[in-house]
Image (cartoon, coloured by chain):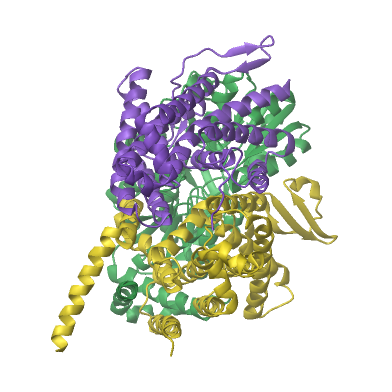
Amino acid sequence: MKKALSVVLTAAMAVSLAACGNDGGNAAGTTDAAAGGAAAESTESGAADAGNAAEADNGADAGSGAAAGEAFKIGGIGPITGDAALYGTAVMNAAQIAVDEINAAGGINGYPIEFKFEDDQHDAEKSVNAYNSLKDWGMQVLMGTVTTTPCVAVADMTAADGMFQLTPSASSTDVIANDNVFQICFTDPNQGAKSAQYIAENGLAEKVAVIYNSSDVYSSGIEETFIAEAEAQGLTVVADEAFTNDSKTDFSTQLQAAQSAGADLVFLPFYYTEASTVLKQADGMGYDPIFFGVDGMDGILGVENFDTSLAEGVMLLTPFAADADDEATQAFVAKYEAAYGSTPIQFAADAYDAIYAIKLAMETAGVTPDMSVSDMGSALSEAMPNITLDGLTGEGMSWEATGEVSKAPMAVVIKDGAYTAM
Amino acid sequence: MKKKTKDQLITIGSIAVLYLIVQILVKTGNMSSLMQGLLVPMCTYSLVAIGLNLCVGYLGELSIGHAGFMCVGAFAGAFCTKVLQGTIENGTLLFVFALFAGILAAALSGFLIGVPVLRLRGDYLAIVTLAFGEIIKNIINVLYVAKDGNGWHFAISDAKSMSLAEDSVWLINGAKGITKVPRLSGFTAGIILIVIALFVVYNLVNSRSGRAVMAIRDNRIAAESVGINITKYKLMAFTISAAIAGAGGVLYAHNLSTLTATPANFGYNMSIMILVFVVLGGIGSFRGSIIAAVLLTLLPEMLRGLSDYRMLIYSIVLILMMLFNWAPKCIVWRQRLAARFQKKTTKEAV
Amino acid sequence: MNFLTYLINGISLGSVYAIIALGYTMVYGIAKMLNFAHGDVIMIGCYVVFLAMSRSGLPALPSVALAVVACTLLGITVEKIAYKPLRRATPLAVLITAIGVSYFLQNMALLLFGADTKSFSPVVNVPALKLADGALTISGTTIVTVAACIVIMIGLSLFVKRTKAGQAMLAVSEDKDAAQLMGVNVNATISLTFAIGSGLAAIAGVLFCSAYPTLTPYTGSMPGIKAFTAAVFGGIGSIPGALIGGILLGVIEIFGRAYISSQLSDAIVFAVLIVVLLVKPTGLLGRQVHEKV
């Protein structure tokens, strides 16, 4: 019986293999003529079959874009399941809003955009799967990925394919190691250094404590440069305490250490989900220093049922605040709330800007949907350093050729349950 | 030919045939990027599942820490590659060295954890392997290794104490792990590793040692009374099992350009996922493990069209598959169905 | 003084682990299975209370009662659909189905309630206890959790010892087949165990979320694993063992973080667990099983 079953399963497997093969086949088959030019991109480092893979796919991609003809195909990748689902969902939703707006206003260079978002569960391997699946769909530009570790893996794939990639929120410097990748968010070292400078220049505190997530690339990346810069600025780091993804419920020990070391400012370089617990526990133990956060802290006021009085006096450096009074932000927030029933977080704003940055770069470079992926990629990479975008996350955003964004961070403080500029 | 040998030849033969089919599909451009991208992960999980099946099916010990061995293998392998990258140019040779390093490290950790732990029974052993996996993950996340003009620098949990020179190169950078790992894994390498692993485990279970291992599984006290050295055989099987998982780790590490230890890839969730492959495929059946690993790696990707409902459907399918495969009522029903089918065919033959 | 504060924090964390561990240990003792979905039943319980309180404006106690009912029903349904058909199969098969159920509940919650973080408002309204002129504070939640833990532990012990259903549970956990021969309805007894375990999960969830108020669809999984570790620590299957194991685990975690290294606190907890199991292979209060030839 076992054997019969395994035969059935093997058959099922073979069928599914064949089925997938056919998918690819159709795409490539319809467009073999157009595919010729793109076959030149093969990876040197890959083993034999990896190289072949790259060739075959580029062919399929360039082709199916041309066959579908009249639209730019932009793909997005991020976690929409798993415990980082919050961030991926925000990016997916906001990007969709931007795409709909652009399409309603006549598209890019006269062509509409097709947008497709794939789940990666915040895992590098799944992210590469998502990327490949989008490639099969005919993606020409990648807006993603949302989180850092998967992004580093995917950036390697886009570099091999010459595809233009713009990440809304993956903030490590490893992400932009390749020429084809650009960032909307600040890099981690940048945030750490800026925060330390801000604290020192405004004389907010002398003794600072840091609590960070040592198993998270984003958090530990900021912590590293913050400490280096804080010492350079003459601040004393009295406590440097960590937590991990596996123990992020209880922060009493870390807070206790900060309190007994006499810190008058606690730097919290991590996301608001954990920060809301930290604030609550600090309140419970009667510890009331200045809490200073980074862009991941944005969103804390939007947590359902959160007692915002706990966040009173929290300061953060963030490029986006959902209750800013400029027109663009208000329009975006209203649209987002109407469509998805929740207040957009900074990830959403980054994604919205990312789509508009792609639009601007495409218009500057004058690309058309029938270009091959790598031609479009190099055209867009060349155009990026020349554009200036007034987005939700910054006025006059511009990009270095390295991929790093330059925009001014905004320091805000939470007063009466709302962000107030400092 | 013995039935067992025939069975094993069928397994290896069908792998060879599948390999050829895949190669033809790839060469003729008839395979989607998604499928091509999935080939190496499928091999990785098949390998680790083979390793775990040796532990669960033949040694009879439940381990939910095999992702830990995979993690050790992955980091040791990738570390070796990064160190040797400058000296050895040939990718294949580099990968072989990485394999040796990864397998050796995983085997060593399997041995070290096995010595004290194998005297525990059942679920207690399981929880210790789980603990081991979590410890490994935690330590790797705070491990810093760098190289500069003054030589090597190591630190645990405190990177600032390392006082690096300007020209330093990070090899393992805490939570960032190892970045820029050359992508040396390929489908061919994966298949070769699977065949070698199958060869090793088949030879083992058919050998004198293998029979000793199974005797211990079936009745430890009886086995001991006939003079079988329990500790020795248990350790041997456990170490080999860990080594195979380590090989899977090396394959994993060289498939993505970045290697970090997160709960998703090396946490207990992954260990349990591998256990799912083993149990679903049939405890003790290596072929079953491979089929289950391949199917369950494919399934979530095939469900991508369902977007939001993808993982929900996946979990339902998983439960249904388990019920279908293991529930006594389902087994009876399947047997009846099979019997009716056979009757029909024999009738037709007559 | 820091030492005492850390100790109190440890007990407070540990009491939450302990109350979750009770559910694990009960189900394990009777059904001999690791119910990996237990943590996710806890999460569902939290969502029920959250929705009842913040959306429908119910007061705390009826909300908790509602959650207990919901979780009990959920536990019975899951048992009926996913575990019962596998009763005669290998325990490993049930373990895997439990994983499937765990994924199912997480993804279901993700679809129903969304990925956004919710902030759980504390259900417990007991004032904090201040000792030594306010230098030491024991929060109300901690007091209630420890009290609830002890009450539940005593209640369960009495239930098992004094009632017929409890005796049936004991009999089933000793020897299923013999119990059946003696006229015990094994299936009903196991279902009852799941019902009680899941009802307890709701209470555990409420206390957990009152202490650590961040609620997401994945809230249950990590405390679930930690509590399972605690149950093993204390000797799985033993009701007082779950309490002791839980509290010790919490204290070790906090002390490890405070005095050794905050980065390595997970590793420290698990290393202590390994050492304990090597010295006492069936946990602190586990029964020594003698094998017969």
Depth order, front residue of C58/A322: C58
> Is residue A378 visible to the viewer in this orientation of the structure?
no
Q: Which chain is purple?
A: C
Which residue is most to the top?
C133
Q: Nearer the viewer, residue C72 or A101?
A: C72
The image quadrant of residue B79 is bottom right
Quadrant location of the C terminus of chain B in the rendered image: bottom left
Pinpoint residue B241: horizontal percent, then vertical percent.
58, 67
Instruction: Give the vertical position of C157 relative to C260 (above or below).
Output: above
Give the letter of the green chain: A
Q: Which chain is yellow?
A: B
**In the image: residue A134, left or right of residue A267:** left
| Rendered residue at 68%/38% (across/down) | C262
Q: Is residue B105 left or right of residue A330?
A: right
- At which x and y percent is residue B217? 53, 64
Of residue C76 and residue B35, the one placed in the foreground of this image is C76
The residue located at (38%, 67%) in the rendering is B295
Residue at 64% x, 36% y: name it: C253
Residue C256, horizontal then vertical, whole percent? 69, 37
Q: Residue at x 45, y 36 (%)?
A: C23
Answer yes or no: is residue A276 visible.
yes
As drawn, C273 above or below A197: below
What count of labels does the image hold? 0
Location of residue A144 with respect to C251 vertically, above or below = below
Q: Quadrant of the N terminus of chain B?
A: bottom left
Q: Position of residue B148 (x, y in %)?
A: 80, 60
